[in-house]
Amino acid sequence: MFSFKITDDLSGIKSYNGFIDNNWVLFEYDSKSDSLFYKIDSLRLEQKSDLHELKILVSDECNNTAVFTGKFYY
């Protein structure tokens, strides 16, 4: 499982999108804890020793966008 804390003190979170290997994946957002999380779906993502790329885009109500990228093995 991946878990991230996302916040915006001024305008608020407008949207978020997550991608693994350039394929969109469903992240869930808990506004009470400002947590964005994704439980790995083993049917979509094969377990192998290949390096995977994770990308998360978060936009606020003013259309400012932050991007996180990382790599992981699964």
Image: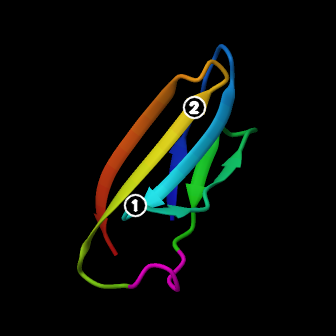
- Mark 2 or mark 1, earlier in chain: 1
Q: Is residue 23 left or right of residue 52?
A: right
Q: Residue at x 52, y 61 (%)?
A: 24
> Going by the picture, which residue comes out furthest to the top?
10
Q: Main secondary structure of the magenta part?
A: loop
Q: Is-magenta flag for residue 44?
A: yes
Mark carried by residue 22: 1
Image x and y of residue 70, in percent: 31, 51
Give the structural element (helix, strand or loop) at label 1: loop
Q: Is residue 59 left or right of residue 47?
A: right
Q: Residue at x 71, y 46 (%)?
A: 30
Instruction: Provide the residue designation for mark 2.
Output: 59
Image x and y of residue 17, in percent: 56, 49
Q: Residue at x 39, y 41 (%)?
A: 68
Image x and y of residue 23, in percent: 46, 65
What's the amino acid at mark 1?
A: Asn
Mark 2 Cα-neighbour bin, 10 Å: few <14, some 14–19, many ≥20 = some
Mark 1 Cα-neighbour bin, 10 Å: few <14, some 14–19, many ≥20 = few
Q: Is residue 42 above or below residue 53?
A: below
Image x and y of residue 5, in percent: 55, 39
Q: Disc 2 versus disc 1: distance between alpha carbons?
A: 18 Å
What's the amino acid at mark 2?
A: Ser
Q: Which residues are magenta?
A: 41-46
Q: Is-magenta flag for residue 54?
A: no
